[in-house]
Image: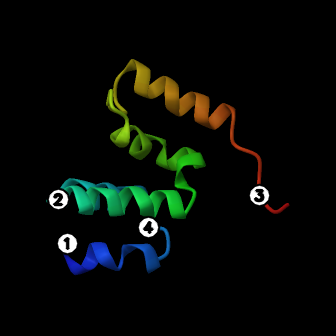
Amino acid sequence: MRSRYKALPETPLYCPQTVFNHWVEADTDEEVESVYDYLQRHQAFDNPEYVHLVELFDDDFIGPYNEQGFQRHIDAYLNPPPLRGW
């Protein structure tokens, strides 16, 4: 596993495009798993801005730019998760 994937858990949450680029450039299953762990550690799975990244790890990846992907984005914005710690 390359060093930038090893250091990923210690970094702050990147913008969605940067995280997507990490996923695309991952060469091994360990690197893909480190991106998944990174998103999970920062609770990005509940964040509407990262909903299209969450779909990358689904078994039935449908993509963010079709009818089902758009509907997931709409649902995420209309039904945001409760705020934590407030």
Residue picked out by circle 2: 28
Q: How is the image coloured?
A: rainbow
Give the CA distance from mark 2 to mark 3. 34 Å
Category of crowding for the residue at label 3, using alpha-carbon neighbours closer than 10 angstroms: few (below 14), some (14–19), many (at least 20)? few
Question: Which residue occupies the extreme front position in the image?
Answer: 30
Q: Which mark is residue 84?
A: 3
Q: Which mark is residue 1?
A: 1
Q: Earlier in the sequence, mark 2 or mark 1?
A: 1
Mark 2 in CB contact with mark 1 (< 8 angstroms)? yes
Which mark lies nearer to you, 1 or 4?
Answer: 1
Q: Looking at numbered disc 4 in the image, what kind of residue is underneath it?
A: Tyr
State the residue in front, 86 or 1: 1
Instruction: Please tell me in which quadrant of the rendered image residue 25 appears.
Output: bottom left
Q: Looking at numbered disc 2 in the image, what kind of residue is underneath it?
A: Thr
- The answer to whether residue 8 is above or below residue 24 is below
Q: Position of residue 44 (x, y in %)?
A: 53, 54
Residue picked out by circle 4: 14
Q: Earlier in the sequence, mark 4 or mark 2?
A: 4
Mark 3 in CB contact with mark 4 (< 8 angstroms)? no
- Residue, x 25% and y 61% (percent of image)? 30
Q: Earlier in the sequence, mark 1 or mark 4?
A: 1
Q: Which mark is residue 43?
A: none
Which mark lies nearer to you, 4 or 2?
Answer: 2
Q: Earlier in the sequence, mark 2 or mark 3?
A: 2
Q: Earlier in the sequence, mark 3 or mark 4?
A: 4
Give the CA distance from mark 4 to mark 2. 21 Å
